[in-house]
Image: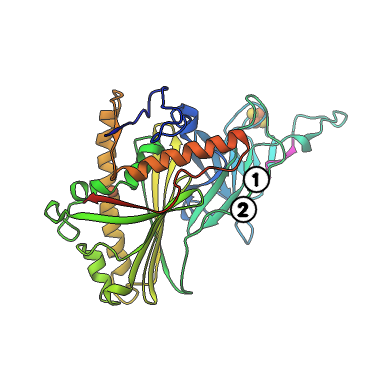
Amino acid sequence: MPDDFPLQSQTGAPGGPDVGPTGWQTPDALMLFGFWYRALPSNQIRRGQLAKAMLLEQPLVIGRGRDQQGQAFALRDACPHRGMPLSCGRFDGQQIECSYHGWRFDAHTGQCQLIPSLVPDQNLKIDRIYAGSYPCEERDDFIWVFIPDPGPAGAGFSKPMPAPIPAPEIPKFSEHYKLAYLTADLPCSVDHGIIGLMDPAHGPFVHQAWWWRTQKSIHEKRKNFEPIPHGFRMSAHTPSSNSAPYKLLRLYADADSITTTIDFVLPNLRSEIIRAGKYWFSSLTTVTPITRNQCRIDVVAAWNLFRWIPFGPELLKFVFAKFVEQDRRTMELQSEGLKHNPHLMLIDDADRPAKWYFQLKAAHLEAKRTGQEMKHPMSGPVTLKWRS
Ligand code: FES
Ligand SMILES: [Fe+2]
């Protein structure tokens, strides 16, 4: 029996076995606050420069100091005085000067440093004025920004709080490795972006290529899944035998020693680790909500394979770019269909990971609401079967 998939409707199935408690149906629940998100590739911002970004419908100005470390920062792109975007202002490498009335803010803390219109006997406590400032860290060639829960409507900003946990990082298994990324804008909500990413059944139809697989190669698969904190894992297994990249891997190690593990963790992290003896390939893919109807996929990969093949990284990037482009194009077409609010469904077992995603999201929001520990939707390991 297919399950209803009331992504757009407000009438969920509270406590239902497959959809879980309501919560993710409401527009505000579509984007999860209180997590780290990838904002921009590091190479898009040079020292002393500013760039605009948008995460979870929050306009940001991102930059890096002009000093030795060139540490990145992220501020709300709105002056706390009268809302002028700070990205229009001047940045001297330490402070940002708003282009409207010249208020100056420390780029890393957002604290106000100067209000030029004040005369000496006007003792406004300017150090209590803050532009919104977000925790910001660089990992694996990306700038990550922590987006906290929004404050009460109309409230201003105060001294920024540090993030409760460090930004996510790609697991690496040797000292030397290569790193590359790919990024693509997807014209759909973060939910459709994420379930598209974890959907095993679209492969033979969307990702057809002679070097990958064809519809003729469709066969039944069984994969073991297990719960992990805030997510689930496709347990270590020997990769699909009919795909060319994995055939390539066999040049490095015998087939039995090749394992791959795929994790999904809230809010949007898909990590895949392939190990073949001392060689490894590790990627962290994120689907980041930009607005309610727009997201961006960033695939960042690290590996110590192919280091001796002249065009190894380029080849890998080419293969990944093809995949991402096929997914992007599919979601572009899908968004046409979604415009008219069709009735949707999730089926077993191929869409079970998508169901877990929605259940995890609902469980996370419920735990936040009640202050209790999150109740994981999976009670233990599960084997799923599908044809792809
Ligand atoms: S709006 Fe920024 S200083 Fe007035
Ligand atoms: Fe895909």
Q: Indicate the quadrant where residue 109 lies.
A: top right
Q: Indicate the quadrant where residue 327 lies.
A: top left
Q: Position of residue 175 (x, y in %)?
A: 48, 74
Callout 1 crowding tier (Cα within 10 Å): few <14, some 14–19, many ≥20? many
Q: Which residue is mark 2?
A: 65
Which quarter of the figure is the N terminus placed in?
Answer: top left
What residue do we see at 69% from left, 40% from top?
Answer: 105
Which residue in the rendered view is the most extreme toward the right?
Answer: 121
Q: Which residue is mark 1?
A: 107
Which residue in the rendered view is the most extreme toward the left?
Answer: 216
Residue nearer the viewer, 371 or 154 = 371
Q: Position of residue 11 (x, y in %)?
A: 41, 22
Q: Amino acid at mark 1?
A: Ala
Callout 2 crowding tier (Cα within 10 Å): few <14, some 14–19, many ≥20? many
Q: Position of residue 326 (x, y in %)?
A: 25, 47
Q: Earlier in the sequence, mark 2 or mark 1?
A: 2
Whether residue 201 is visible here, answered yes or no, is yes
Q: Does label 1 point to a residue whose CB lies under 8 Å from ligand 1?
A: no
Query: Is residue 291 left or right of 318 when viewed as pictured?
Result: right
Q: Is residue 17 above or below residue 44?
A: above
Main SS of the magenta part reads loop
Q: Which residues are magenta?
A: 107-114
Whether residue 101 is visible here, answered yes or no, is no
Magenta stretch encompasses residue 341: no
Secondary structure at badge 2 equals loop
Q: Are marks 2 and 1 in contact (CB under 8 Å)?
A: yes
